Amino acid sequence: MSILTSLVNAYDRLPDAPPFGYSNEKIGFVISLNEDGSVFDVIDWRDGEGKKARPRQTLVPQPVKRTVAIAPNFLWDKTSYVLGITAGEGKRTSEEHKAFIEKHLEAIGESDDAGLRALSLFLTNWSPDQFVLPQWTEEMKDQNVVFALESERRSRFLHDRPAAKVLWARVSASAGDAASICLATGNPGIVARLHPSIKGVWGAQSSGAALISFNLDAFESYGHTQGENAPVSEAAAFAYTTALNRFLERDSGHRIQIGDASTVFWADAKDMEAAEEAEDMLALYLDSDPEEAKSDEEKNAASKIKEKLAAIREGRALREVEPRLADGVRFYVLGLAPNAARLSVRFFYQGDFGSLTANYQRFMADMRIEPPPRDGYPPLWRYLRETAVLGKSENVTPNLAGEWMRAILAGTSYPLTLMSSVLTRIRADGDINALRAGILKALLVRNFDRENTPVALDPSFSNKGYLLGRLFAVYEQIQSAALGTKVNATIKDKFYGSASAQPRKVFHLLDTGSANHLSKVGKQKPGYRVVLEKQVAAIMEMMEPGNDPYPASLSAEDQALFGLGYYHQRNEAFKKTAQTISEGETA
């Protein structure tokens, strides 16, 4: 099933989906009119006060697709169109206001509806110089505005009146092109020339961006223009954009940010409760720290889902944990990223929830490392931060998030750029934490078929890269024992990058330096010196010291094992320092 078809189907299941031709937009103010067109009051419709005031999401006639041309909305718009007032320079404000007036006076004509007549009279008599305090405030400028009759302001807006709905249906239908077979639904319908904008994608234009558009001759073919090149009916275009915009809303429960990809997900099942539970569970797969439940009922439901999630993370099959989710629940995950005025599809996954869960379990097994991350299971976006400069999501390499998510969802190989990114960050900042070690292990297991890659310290694992990483950690431990922790620069700070890539250039120097440090340790803690010397000897014996144990260079695969060996050995030292000292003193 295509992206558009699955989104059209999702629209049909939205519990509070706006009807065709309408959308939820941010409305800041309401102009209340008397029937003679005079202004009774101007109401601040925003939630909150002062600088925290935010426009309300309000159902209004669907906005037009604006590019550079002047195009007014119907029965609502921002103040530059409605009132001819803006906070900026407003080089074409008068033209925008004129277009708004002409469009509505022509559409309303001689209507006998009281609300439409009132609007017509208002637009005829209004002039921008009437915008003065106290009724008209500076805060109103550039906000979206709707109208209402004062007699019914508390029950409905002007665009909610039956006559206004009929008028809007006529106005919107007149813009349609010829009928054709819709690619999304397979049904005949009026082809949408321009598709509604998608809003809420991180990094895209705040006014919205297009998922499908043809605005240059190079993109067109066979004499077709704009939407005719990929015929999608107006109804289907409205449905898929409405569903996608709903999923992209803040706190929708259907989105998460993974690198530069705004990721949305939704389920499809005959049993809607099962679909909702699958969506809740995937939200925990992707983000281990979802928004906190508010009511007791929500808390109980969240607690039950977390129990099932814990069982899944332990490796139990979904069919055992929740049988009704194993079959009959289709799942869709879509990643979108900004691309000028358009959107790029970073990845799109569709499959049954059972397969998705199995792939998630495989990912968890790949990432398992000892000792584990201090804060438990991290959200997926947290892993990607380990590849970015300064640990910031905006610095994640473009396309990496999409390729990585595709590998997790579909169970395919991880992108090799992930390994180079992690190794580069380790060499740059010297930080080898549980998340980075887990990523390196996952790459070795899945991409290089190293199923025997150690989860925890394995003294019998004989790979030279792993052994060199362990040896480097012991040399660092020796330096710390001799000089203490307050050292301007440790050997890790100075030599980790070269030691992990070209060990022959560094390890002879490290070996010489460790001899001096061991001499100092022996004067203070002779037993501890014996323990450290035994650790070095045990590792060197595994490396066949009769031959040159230090290769000239290490491949990326062996550099990953170097980092893994360092992580295991260093953390083992932290765990057993007190024990090893006491054993050495009594030896």
Image (cartoon, grey):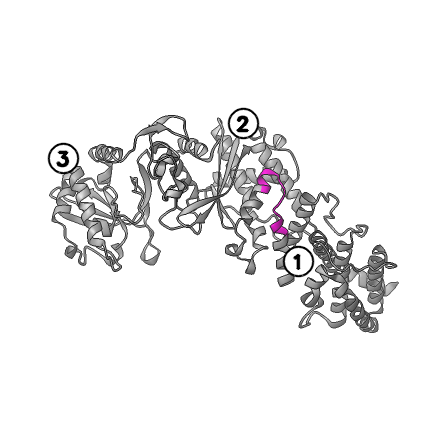
Q: Nearer the viewer, residue 499 or 533?
A: 499
Describe the element under mark 1 as helix, strand or loop.
Answer: loop
Q: What residue type is labelled 2?
A: Gly
Inter-mark Cα distance, 1 to 2: 42 Å
Marks 3 and 2: which is nearer the front?
A: 3
The residue at 74%/48% (across/down) is 454
Give the percent coordinates (x, y) of residue 65: 31, 43
Helix, strand or loop for the magenta stretch, by majority: helix
Badge 3: few (under 14), some or many (20 or more) residues near its Cα, within 10 Å? Answer: some
Range shown magenta? 407-419
- Tell me if 144 is positioned left or right of 182 in this view: left
Lower sequence index among marks 1 and 3: 3
**Left or right for 483, reference 376:** right
Q: Quadrant of the C terminus?
A: bottom right
Queried whether the magenta region covers residue 374, the answer comes back as no
- Tell me whether the residue at label 3 lies in contact with that at label 2, contact meaning CB atoms closer than 8 angstroms: no
Which residue is more in the foreground, 278 or 464?
A: 464
Q: Is residue 163 visible to us here?
A: yes
User: Which residue carries the number 3 mark?
Assistant: 111
Residue at 61% in and 30% down: 319
Element on which disc 2 rests: loop
The kind of secondary structure element at disc 3 is: loop
Q: Report which residue position mark 1 lands on.
A: 432
Counting from the top left corner in percent of width and height, residue 565 is at: 74, 55
Amino acid type of the residue tagged 3 in the rendering = Ser
Residue identifier under label 2:
328
- The amino acid beneath tag 1 is Ile
Task: Pick whichever, 465 or 580, lies toward us.
Answer: 465
Q: Of the residues under marks 1 and 2, which one precedes in the sequence? A: 2
Q: Disc 3 versus disc 2: distance between alpha carbons?
A: 52 Å
Residue 256: image location, x then y, percent: 49, 46
